[in-house]
Image: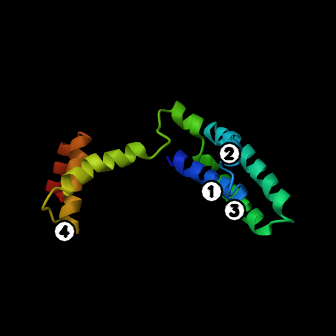
Amino acid sequence: MQIVDLYHARQHLWDLAALLYPHDMAAKKRWMVPMKDLLDHGRTELLVEWLREIAAEHTETQPGLAEEISKEADYFQTNAHRMRYPAFREQGFFVGSGVIEAGCKSIVGVRLKQSGMFWTVRGANAIIALRCCRFNQRFEDFWAETRAA
């Protein structure tokens, strides 16, 4: 299952807002409201359609801007299947990367980054494997595989 981090996807929209309204924060925020709403509600196809319309409006006067908007529209179109946020939430999945980052920090970082510790890649990989098995309650499986090898 692949999910584009919602906050990463929103950043793409904020980058577009900054290109469209470089000196007007209020206009950026107003522009973001419907765009963010479409993204958050999994209406990526309509979001892409709107972005393509906005790009077309700037083709004559600002071809560079139109090209950037088109690139972002392509990004959302290509990744639409990984941006079905309502469906993912319904299935109990997280749509942001914060949970994964926190897990990495607490499982890996806490053990490997203590004061005075130095690791070889092989040693670090071994400890990470053991910790992941322990926290996933698969320690016995790991131990059995290690003995068999």
Q: Are marks 1 and 3 in contact (CB under 8 Å)?
A: no
- Label 2, residues with CA under 10 Å away: few <14, some 14-19, many ≥20: few
The residue labelled by disc 2 is: 26
Whichever of labels 4 and 2 marks the residue nearer the N terminus, that label is: 2
**In this rendering, the label closer to the viewer, 3 or 4:** 3
The residue labelled by disc 4 is: 120
**In this rendering, the label closer to the viewer, 1 or 3:** 1
**In this rendering, the label closer to the viewer, 2 or 3:** 2
The residue labelled by disc 3 is: 71
How far apart marks 1 and 4 lie (CA) works out to 40 Å
Amino acid marked by disc 2: Ala
Whichever of labels 1 and 4 marks the residue nearer the N terminus, that label is: 1
Amino acid marked by disc 1: Asp
How far apart marks 2 and 3 lie (CA) works out to 24 Å
What secondary structure is marked by label 1? helix
119 w.r.t. 96: above or below: below
